[in-house]
Image: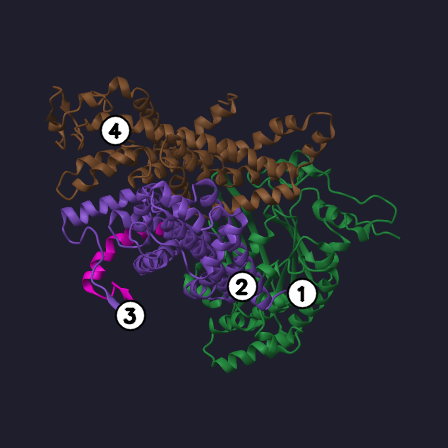
Amino acid sequence: MLGFVIQRFIQAVGVMAVMSVIVFFGVYAIGNPIDIVIPPDATQEIREEAISRLGLDRPLIEQYFTFVSNLLQGDLGRSFVYNMPVLELIGGRLPATLELVLISVVSATVLGVSLGIYAGYRPDSWVSKTIMAVSVLGFSVPSFWVGLILILFFAVNLGWLPAGGRGETVEIWGVAWSFPTLSGLSHIVLPAVNLALFKLAMMIRLARAGTREIMLTDTIKFARAAGLSEGTILRRHLLKLISIPIITVFGLELGSTLAFAVVTETIFSWPGVGKLIIDSIAVLDRPVMVAYLILVAFLFVTINFVIDLVFALIDPRVRKGASA
Amino acid sequence: MSVDRSPLGKFWAEYRENKMAVVALIIVVLMILLALFAAVISPQNPYDLANLSLMDSRRPPGFVGSGGYTHLLGTDPQGRDLLSAIFYGLRISIQIGLAAGLVSLSIGTTLGILAAYLGGRIETLIMRLVDLQLSFPAILLALVIVAMLGQGKAQLIGALVAAQYAYFARTAYGAAKAERGKDYIEAALATPLSARLVVWRHMLPNCTPPLIVVATVQIANSISLEATLSFLGLGLPVTEPSLGMLISNGFPYMMSGRYWISVYPGVALIILIVAINIVGDQVRDQFNPRLRK
Amino acid sequence: MSDPVLSVQNLTTHFFTRAGVVKAVDGVSFDLARGEIMGLVGESGSGKTVTGFSLLGLVDAPGRIVDGSVKLNGTDLLTLPASDLRARRGREISMIFQDPIATLNPMLTIGQQMLLAVEAHERLSKRAATARAAELLTQVGIPSAEMRLRAYPHEFSGGMRQRVAIAIALLHRPAVIVADEPTTALDVSIQAQILLQMRDLAAETGTAMIWISHDLAVVSSLASKLAVMYAGRIVEQGPTADLLRDPRHPYTAGLIASLPAMTTPGLPLTQIPGTTPSLLSLPVGCPFAPRCDRSSEECQRDPEMTDQGDRGWRCFHPVTRPAEVPA
């Protein structure tokens, strides 16, 4: 298993390296590199001075290495708009996004898998059919529209929940979280539901398909032949067997949810990283854009790596290696 | 009553059995027609700035404007008749969705078949790239490209294509690879027939059914993605509002009860997307050999 | 014979598919004596596996048992409510399947799976249950049983996995074990081992066995009684030796004749011409008639089972001369 972990780790590092090259050349070669550092309205003099100071007239390869070394030291540049190091800027907003994403993802998975297993176990009941019909909607309808409707309904018409912003925060382990407070909770409900919808739909369909397939296998038949109760079969056999595809998709979808957070944060004015990037694109705050890309790539790679590790832990075939 | 039908005839006969899918298809066709004839049927040309009067802006449905006709769905912040704006918006959404879809289809299919046909290093290279791309969420990719290239129709389509060609590539690859392994392809390649002909006449037709399915889904996705981007302010310029932009325009007014500016374009968008998805689902079920009797 | 441990009367299982009704099992009847090993032989599509599933009530939708009775120790399993049936499955009657790799859950240890099977019917302390599991593993010929209990299925070879499945099937000393082609997926050398092992185990424990197979040669070395299935029905049954030496049904004769052992070396293998009919569109009358060189007008009617002592056959033109035996 150690070999597996090391191999995956090297792969992860490799992908990061490739991503850094892509981002670098994407920004420096396609765009005008100086625009990363200097606001668009600077004078010609300042531009030239900055170009030579920052070594932007050096060969591209050299620039790349400077870029990477800066990166590894945590220097991601300074934002034009906020005039502070980008790392600090992003760091300040990240907890909000993480909180939203985590709550969405966890609730979507737990609820989705439960509903999906039920739908797969009793596919012909009307409850199952309803679940499946609704899940189709979860897929096709664009999430920003759902957010809109949620706001219209719950915030404007019923007035039960706030239409945007983050509630009061509480500091745990040095980071500000909002869900422990009542106001925080009420603010996080709508955006979390909005964000969770797509993933929920996906988990329902996945769990249902997996359940139907697994229930027809010989493993389940044999367990039945041995006289195991349906409850035991579901708990001890099905859950274990279905965990592999669920976890795979969970990992993939985690990244996707991070991406969709961009939309949700915009609609609900949630002060996270997603809103930051949209605002930055609008005003061409390029250091922030670059840093965001790097961050996302990093998160992706990390998530994939962690998922691989989790596999190694739960699947005995990977854990123990080849058969005796 | 065993009339020998063409494959298309048989396909349609089976399709007809699902009432909902037929309704969905009618809706899609209707919307396409609305979009095509937008200029003719709209009571007002929403792009003609001279026509607009700010006095008419943000009026509720049923308001009779300065142009003398009833705004059936109200007006937007610029004074545009919402119904007309929706028709034009439909046109743009469908245009972009279709364009992005077709270009992705061509590029993706070519790549996929190429990879399956050539094999070896090229195959691994192409498919690795495709896999990498598939694991990256489409919206992020589109965001990044729009951010890098700026706004505009071509850039938008480019972003959408970049985000979606991978699905086509993977599907085409899978189907082509399955076909490539078959003996008759080997036999055909051994003949003096040009390789291009073999690919065109043999491998391509086998890929068509799954590609059609992916195409319908991806067109719906393109429309959805474009709407999302427009909503975020990263799509087309304000003067050519797609449905997403209309929704985004109306968003600030929702709190004050002027819901129609966002809701009606939204409803139009949803109907379009859901209808396309239903058609796509039915097509997919019909092509799936495992679900057949 | 004294009361049979298993008595099946007119078992009928149909599958209600979109394309039509598939009569997978169409009126199957047989008796099984205590400790007896019966071979259920037939080609794929003959209904033998579905018969096995029907005995345990494990038929998946769209299949359903529509008629008949399955009396185990006097109780008709088909009339029992689901919970009663489940209580008997694994305890009075159990089953092992063809592919040992698919049978065991790769994510649980052997011990965990065996314990689940024990706990399904008895409340034992974990230690007692583990001891029982280890005892059975030893009995089926797996050394170092306690250690092996902590292993995962993929650490075992195919033959060993099948032995584990057999051990699980024997945990509660059932009266009947249904074995659905248990050696088909294994190497030939392992096959022989498992065959012998099962025969000895059956003798030791007094367990009756129904051995389902398409391989006449394999089954005849083990079973004292044979039942030959074709298109969902038993077309012939009787003591193994009698059947092999003196088959009555043309299909049985064809099966025997097509065994490589029955062919003179150097001559082409005998085949039964034609293919098994689709169960969706069975011919009227005797289903074997289209392939039979003895068929006549009469065969347009469905032949009933003709009983003669402990033998039976469904044929209007039974074979009367003994099968050819090579010199």
Q: Indicate whether A304 appears above or below B165.
A: below
Q: Position of residue B84 (x, y in %)?
A: 23, 25
Chain at tag 1: C
Residue B200 figure quarter: top right
Pointer 4 residue:
B86
Q: Looking at the image, how many numbered discs can be counted on the residues?
A: 4
Pointer 3 residue:
A172
Q: Position of residue A33 (x, y in %)?
A: 43, 44
Q: Main secondary structure of the magenta part?
A: helix
Type of the residue with mark 4: Ile
Q: Indicate whether A123 appears above or below B22.
A: below
Q: CA distance from mark 1 to mark 3?
A: 56 Å
The chain coloured brown is: B
Q: CA distance from mark 2 to mark 3?
A: 42 Å
Q: Position of residue C116 (x, y in %)?
A: 49, 71
Q: Do the residues at discs 2 and 1 belong to one chain?
A: yes
Q: CA distance from mark 2 to mark 4?
A: 56 Å
User: The magenta stretch spans which residues?
Assistant: A175-201
Secondary structure beneath dot 2 equals loop
Residue B62 in view of the camera: no
Residue A49 in view of the camera: yes
Pointer 2 residue:
C105
Way the structure is coloured: by chain
The chain coloured purple is: A
Q: Do the residues at discs 2 and 3 belong to one chain?
A: no
Q: Position of residue A308 (x, y in %)?
A: 51, 60
Eye-nearest disc, 2 or 1: 2
The chain coloured green is: C
Q: Residue furthest top?
A: B40
Pointer 1 residue:
C159
Type of the residue with mark 3: Ile
